[in-house]
Image (tube, rainbow, N blue to C red):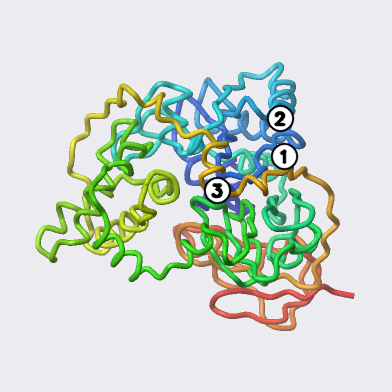
Amino acid sequence: MSLSEKVRLAGVVGAGGGGFPTHVKLGGRADIVIANGAECEPLLHKDAAVMEHFAAEVVEGVRLSMEAVGAKDGVVGIKAKNGHAVDQVRAACKGTAVRVHLLGDYYPAGDEYDLVHEVTGRLIPPAGIPLQVGCIVNNVETLANIAAAAAGRPVLDKILTVAGAVHEPLTLTVPIGTSLRECIAAAGGLSVSSPVLMLGGLMMGEFSVNLDTPVVKTTTGVVVLPADHPVAMRKLTPPVAQARIGKSACDQCRYCTEFCPRYLLGYAVEPHQVMRGLGFTATGTERWNEWAALCCSCGLCTLYACPEQLFPREACDDAKGVMRKAGFKWSGSMTVKPHPIREGRRVPIHGLMRKLEVEKYSHPAPWREAGVRPAKVVLLLKQHAGVPAVPKVKVGDAVRRGQLIADVAAGAMGAPIHASLDGVVASVTDKNICIERGA
C-alpha cells in the first residue's frame, strides 16, 4: 500500500490549521519537502513542543514524504529562538537527507509563500501552490502524523496550546473531540470571569465564547482573553459595523498595504484599495476586489498596521467571498518581485505582542502530560477541507479507540474520522458524532 493511501486511511489532514487532506499532497511530485515549524501566532507554542518532544517522528515524516514524492531534499523550518527544538530536530536529522533551516522571529513566518521563498528562494506563482515550484509544505505535527499513519495508526489525538488568561499556560495532548473547557481546566482554569476564546490564535484565529467547543484535527491552540480586552472587542465588532466604520473613516494612508507581507513579497495585494472600494457602488467591484485576491488573511493590516484601528483584513475577506461566489479566477500579473525594503518591514513578534497588548500573557506554555480523560467526545464530521465525512455508526453502537466511525465517498475530497476513545455512540447528527466513555 502506498504512503498516500495509508495517510488517507489514517485521516491525516493539515494540523497547522488549514486542514487540507494530506494524502492529496503526497500524490504529487516535488524536489523538496518542507516542514513548517515557523509557528508565528503570538502566545502559541504547539509546534515548538512537537519538535522538541517528537523530533524523531517529524523527521521520519519528512523522510517518508520525500520517498513518496521523489524529493532529494528535506528541510525543517524552525525559528532560531526555539533552541531546544532546534537541538532535538538537528539530532534527529543526523544520518538523513533532512536539514534544519533557521528562521527569524517575525510574523507571519509560517505563511507558506513566505516560507518557500525563505527556504528555497523560489516564488510561488500568484494564486498558485508550492507544488508549482517543486515544493510540498506540511506542518510539523502533520508530518509526525504521517509517520504514525505509515505504522498503521490513525489520527486520534491533538496537541494544542492553552494560553492567555489562564492560571497555568501549557501545551498538552488530548483526544480529538475533547471540549476546550476541559483543556482550560488542565491549564489551571480561567483567570477572568468573562472569557473570549481565540481559537487558533490572536491574528488568524476565530473567536468564540463557547467553552464546550470541541477540539478538532486543526486546533492549534486557544488564547483566552477577557471580553473587555482590545483584541476581543475588535473581534466582536459586527461585520456590518466594521464595513460602515471603514467606509467613513479610512483616509487611504496605505499603512495596511505597506506592511502587508504578500505585498512586500511582490504580490498584487493592496488592502487600502479594497478599503477604498467600500465606498463604491456595485459597479466596478470586479476591479477593487482583485486587490484582495492574493491576501493570506494574516491580520497584520487590521491588528498592527492601521493607525485608525479599522478592519482592512475583514474587508479583504469579504472581497474574497464575493469573488468565490462569482467564480473569479486570477487573471492579473504573474510577475513577482520582492519589495526592496521587505526585510526592513518585517514585524517582530515582540513588537506585535506589544501592539496587541498581550505582553502580560507572554509566559512559557511547556508541553506536559495533562492526563485529560474526557467523559465524552464530540467529533465533528467536517474537520478538514472538502466535504463532511458520513457517519458509519449509529446511536447505541459500542466503539473502540481507533475505530473508523465516519468516512467520505470514494473520490471525494475529505478525510475519515476515527473514535478517539472507547465508548458508546450517544448521538449522531449531520454535524457530529458524540461518544460517551465506556465504564
Dot 3 lies on which element? loop
Label 3 sits on what residue type? Answer: Gly
**Quarter of the figure that contains the C terminus:** bottom right
Q: Residue furthest left?
A: 283
Dot 2 lies on which element? helix
Tag 2 or tag 3, which sits nearer the N-term?
Answer: 3
Q: Which residue is mark 2?
A: 85
Q: Which residue is mark 3?
A: 14
Label 2 sits on what residue type? Answer: Ala
**Residue at the image position 67 percent from the left and 44 percent from the top:** 362
Distance Cα–Cα, label 3 vs label 2: 20 Å
Where does the image place residue 169, in percent across and percent down from the top left?
A: 75, 51
**Residue at the image position 44 percent from the left and 31 percent from the top:** 346
Where does the image place residue 393, in percent across and percent down from the top left?
A: 66, 75
Tag 2 or tag 1, which sits nearer the N-term?
Answer: 1
Dot 1 lies on which element? helix
**Quarter of the figure that contains the N terminus:** top right
**Residue at the image position 70 percent from the left and 39 percent from the top:** 50
**Residue at the image position 31 percent from the left and 44 percent from the top:** 294
Distance Cα–Cα, label 3 vs label 1: 17 Å
Q: Which mark, by number, is residue 49?
A: 1
Q: Residue furthest right?
A: 439
In the rendered structure, are the residues bearing label 1 and label 2 in contact, judged by CB atoms less than 8 Å apart? Answer: yes
Tag 1 or tag 3, which sits nearer the N-term?
Answer: 3
